[in-house]
Image: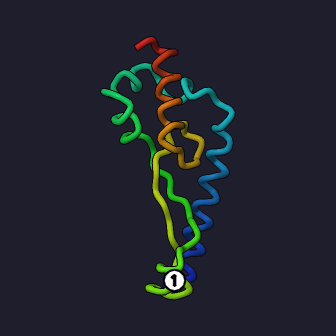
Amino acid sequence: MSVFSISLCSALMLMSVSLVASELATQDISEIISKEEFLSYQNVADFIEHSPKVTEFVAPEADDIEQYGSDVMKTLTGSDCDRDGKMDSNPQCNAVFYKLWMKYQR
């Protein structure tokens, strides 16, 4: 398979994941993460570590293009703590954990 075919297939798969995840965005996070699951996490770092991972395409930097050529693709992988299909920052993950912590009165 060519690099173009692999890139196109990857992009289409990621778009379909985003569409499915957008349906979950209207749900309350406590409907997705049960009390039992939440209580299994030792702390916020453990919660973030066990959250689903999301990969996003980002623009390559000039050094990347210089080293690998103009056809280079760059991705970032991070945690999706609120299960909405988008990568969350550390403060967002902390907020989700705190919301669940308050709801389940840990």
Quick one: label 1, few (<14), some, or many (20+) residues within 10 Å? some
User: Which of the colour schemes (rainbow, by chain, secondary structure, one colour) is used?
Assistant: rainbow
Q: Is residue 36 left or right of residue 6?
A: left
User: Which residue is label 1 attached to?
Assistant: 65
**Rendered location of residue 10, percent (x, y):** 55, 68
**Res. 82 image quadrant:** top right
Residue located at (37% from left, 21% from top): 39
**Rendered location of residue 86, percent (x, y):** 58, 48
Residue located at (35% from left, 36% from top): 45
Three-letter code, disc 1: Ile
Marker count (numbered): 1
Q: Is residue 47 left or right of residue 20?
A: left
Q: Is residue 24 above or below residue 57?
A: above
Q: Is residue 106 above or below residue 15?
A: above
Q: Secondary structure at mark 1?
A: helix
**Rendered location of residue 42, percent (x, y):** 30, 27
Q: Quadrant of the C terminus?
A: top left
